[in-house]
Image (spheres, helix red, strand yellow):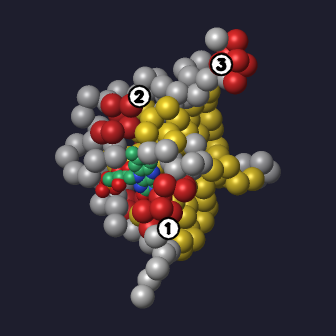
Amino acid sequence: MNTFDSKEFRRVLGAFTTGVTIMTTVDEDGNQYGVTANSFSSVSLDPPLILWSQARTSSSYAAFKNCERFVVNILADHQIPISNQFARSGGNKFHGVMVNEGLGGVPIIEDCSAYLECVKVAVHPGGDHDIYIGQVERMYRSENRPLAFGEGRYVVPVAHEMLAAA
Ligand SMILES: Cc1cc2nc3c(=O)[nH]c(=O)nc-3n(C[C@H](O)[C@H](O)[C@H](O)COP(=O)(O)O)c2cc1C
């Protein structure tokens, strides 16, 4: 009998607050793909490497598995609707979303807090997910404050000294 409590596992993972990203890519026919992901993490400074993991059940799994490049769009605190739009399967996820073309034609979502344009350099199996390692080729940071996600909901990070002063 499997006694591992998956719901509790999710709740425990939720104690680790993260940023929110949308991973984007494009296929050979120019079709665009995007997935909301908070599994993003830095890996190495030299060379500059990052990772994220994707569920194998994702309908855009094949697109990311086969892609050469992807972009990590780090969402700003006003982009909750866009986060939700890219967390839903099916339909045109890019409907009403302003994008620019990055390296290799990969879409970059406008008005994010920051973004990283990556070449996919490795894929590792990770249980029911695959782990993608990307090498950063180009990046950008704006003044827009980042969105965060913790305990299963969106949160806005506030500097600790601001709270103490309030
Ligand atoms: C805050 C948040 C973080 C998420 N993080 C991930 C993730 O790291 N990896 C993943 O595969 N799915 C993650 N998801 C779920 C995917 O966004 C969702 O399953 C996917 O976009 C559904 O569309 P698809 O079928 O095109 O993949 C997350 C969802 C939310 C709301």
Res 85 visible: yes
Q: Which residue is farthest bottom? A: 1
Viewport quadrant of the C terminus: top right
Above or below residue 46? Residue 108 is: above
Q: Is residue 31 left or right of residue 127?
A: left
Res 104 visible: no
Task: Return the x and y of residue 81 as percentages of the image width and height.
Answer: 33, 31
Above or below residue 22? Residue 11 is: below
Label annotation for residue 79: 2
Ligand 1 within 8 Å of disc 1? The answer is: no
Residue type at tag 1: Asp
Secondary structure, mark 2, is loop
Q: Is residue 1 left or right of residue 81?
A: right
Secondary structure, mark 3, is helix
Residue type at tag 3: Leu
Viewport quadrant of the N terminus: bottom left
Label annotation for residue 147: none
Q: Which residue is located at x 67 percent, y 23 percent?
A: 159
1 vs 3, front mark: 3
- Contact, mark 2 vs mark 1 (Cβ under 8 Å): no
Task: Return the x and y of residue 149 as percentages of the image width and height.
Answer: 50, 40
Q: Earlier in the sequence, mark 1 or mark 3?
A: 1
The residue identified by callout 1 is 130
Residue 18: name its quadrant.
top right
Secondary structure, mark 1, is strand
The residue identified by callout 3 is 163
Q: Earlier in the sequence, mark 2 or mark 1?
A: 2
Cα–Cα span, label 1 and label 3 = 39 Å
Above or below residue 37? Residue 130 is: below
Residue closer to the observer: 160 or 55: 160
Q: Which residue is located at x 69 percent, y 24 percent?
A: 160
Q: Which residue is located at x 64 percent, y 44 percent?
A: 137
